[in-house]
Amino acid sequence: MKTETRNGSGGQSASRGHVKAAGWGKGLSILTRITVMALRHPFQSALAIGATLIASGFQLMIPKLLGRAIDEAQGIGAGGSVGTAAQDALLVTALLLLAASILRGLFTMVQNYYSEAVGHHIGYELRLACYEKIQRLSFSFHDSVHSGDLITIGLLDLEGVRMYFSTALVRMIFLSVLIGLGAYLLLSTDVVLGLLALSFVPFVGWRSSVTQLRLRATWLDLQERLQVLTRVMEENLGGIRVVRAFAAQQHELEKFDAASKSALELAHQRVGIRVANTSAMTLSFFAAMGLVLYVGGGKVMAGEITVGTLASFLTFMTILQMPVRQLGLMVNAFARASTCGARLFGLLDLDVAVKDAPDARPLQLTEGTLRFENVAFAYPASPDTPALDGVSFEARRGQTIGIVGPPGSGKSTLAHLIARFYDVSGGRITLDGQDIRSVTLKSLRRSVVVVQQDSFLFTTTIENNIAYGDPWAKENQISRAAESAQLHNYVLGLPASYGTVVGERGVSLSGGQRQRLSIARAVMLKPAVMVFDDSTAAIDAATEQRIRHAMRRYASERVTIIVAHRLSSLMHADHILFMEDGRIVEEGSHEELLARNGRYRALYDLQVRPGDDALTG
Ligand code: ADP
């Protein structure tokens, strides 16, 4: 089983750029896996394949019947009948022809419907599996993969796999029957004419496959160039203020033009490939037809075959032309399913790094005590540089722990380890004596809530955003949480109050308001451990103090961890840890740390003027 991260031992990425085209053996096993998925819908698959066989049978009857009709019209039908008898025979053949065409059409409909249906079922199952996997993959994976790559796997690659059943497998059955049985019928009627009629098949099949594979390669290239175009546009829109402020429109336009030109060149190249090959294939088809006409016409004149037989040869060639031209599409569909499947299954087969242990039990909370015991941690991206080293502390219910230190000292890392976003590399973290790796993730994440630095809002109402973790929450619970986060009065002033839609497509909130909404969202859950990861940085000190005041009782019932840059955010904490290079270098209460005259004191002198203590409440 592959590991979830790219950089760990045996690490493997699911990103597009890093998965090479599957080798033959691997490609075959991927295609087998998709076929097995299709066969899990036996009724639909059987109908699709059965209808394909029947439709190709009827398709093959048409040239035969046409030839027979022509012969009968000339009075040289099977019985050599003339007059009314010949007319009757012609009518019967015409009706048979009509019936064969209708039945062919009907069975083709059944084939198309059920082969597409199987594809859509596979698409649905894979889409769900992908989404579920992405939800479960841990942060170390998301750290290493661009979210755009995941979206591409979930959309484009999934489409390649979904199309496999209808455009590769069923089409292959259809083409095999049509060409195989058709060749037999032609050759058994007249070997020379049969060979001439089939002479265009290898050339067209080869050209079509080569063209489609070349078009596929350039298509992938084109997608990459279009992605560059999208990125330039995204950056331009995102940074529009910077662009205008620095009068860099011309520079931006040139960047966009360069990306756009490179996409245009490739598009031209693609048109060239397609047009040249279409003409070559058509030429070879008509050349073969000319040969059949010439040699067949001679045979008709020599009385070796009838005009009807010659006509059936020509009709057969016309019928065969389209599917043979589509051979390339089929080859392409196989190639596409194999590479897309490699990436998609690569993602689905990743082993989730942070998951429930086999014997995991729900967390049992009693005292509500959190302990770090000699915790060490290194990110998979830089295994040799520990982000945390030898961190030990204890926090009991009702206590507030402040964590401060220079940027990069490991504060956020410490906060994330409590919710088990990553697993510790050494030591252990316990909640009421239970190692957090031994309890179920669901129960842990109900008991530990991290209010992040970046407050993410979903495009929905304020009410739904606050109640995200508890969809059954009552209105008064939501407004009470908003009151604690000092958001209630602001919400009442909005046009639709708690029903106001926020997020990218709704009312935009300021950084501080977003943070207050995140705090309200976390407060709703009443966790045993509440972690604020620099989540009040955009809130002014006075409002922050009011929040702290409103949450005083709330804080007395749980462990509160406050990570902050601003000392005034955590000076009131019962215990403060000063971090540097992943280690606790000083700890104690505010007064104790001041008295030590160390790093904390230096930071205090830098940030807080004497007399400002009143701010901290
Ligand atoms: P702080 O919160 O104190 O600013 P962090 O905990 O964010 O510090 O970071 C501690 C160290 O870990 C830094 O050296 C940082 O570069 C590194 N780091 C943080 N996040 C990641 C990540 N997702 N992947 C790899 N390294 C990281």
Image (spheres, rainbow, N blue to C red):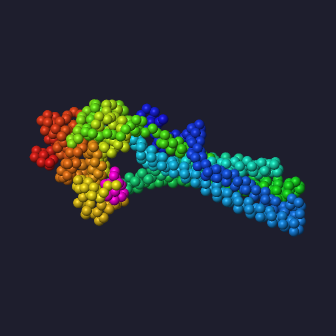
Question: Camera-side residue: 597 or 128?
Answer: 128
Question: Camera-side residue: 107 or 330?
Answer: 107
Left or right: where does residue 9 sit relative to residue 206? Answer: left
Left or right: where does residue 159 sit relative to residue 174? Answer: left
Q: How many labels does the image show?
A: 0
Q: Does residue 466 show up magenta in the picture?
A: yes
Q: Residue furthest left?
A: 611
Q: Which residue is drawn at 67% across and 60% down?
A: 106
Q: Residue at x 12, y 35 (%)?
A: 595
Question: Camera-side residue: 611 or 289?
Answer: 611
Q: In the rendered image, which quarter is residue 441 located in?
A: top left
Q: Is residue 18 visible?
A: no
Up-down relation of residue 83 to residue 437 (above or below): below
Q: Does residue 560 show up magenta in the picture?
A: no
Q: In the rendered image, which quarter is residue 474 located in?
A: bottom left
Q: Which residue is drawn at 82% across and 54% down?
A: 296
Left or right: where does residue 132 sit relative to residue 525? Answer: right
Residue 12: x, y in percent?
46, 37
Residue 39: x, y in percent?
60, 46
Q: Main secondary structure of the magenta part?
A: loop
Question: Camera-side residue: 152 or 443?
Answer: 443
Up-down relation of residue 344 to residue 322 (above or below): above
Residue 395: x, y in percent?
23, 38
Q: In the rendered image, which quarter is residue 360 located in?
A: top left
Q: What stretch is highlighted in magenta?
A: 457-471
Q: Residue furthest bottom?
A: 84
Q: Which residue is drawn at 20% across and 48% down?
A: 553
Residue 413: x, y in percent?
30, 39
Left or right: where does residue 68 sit relative to residue 545? Answer: right
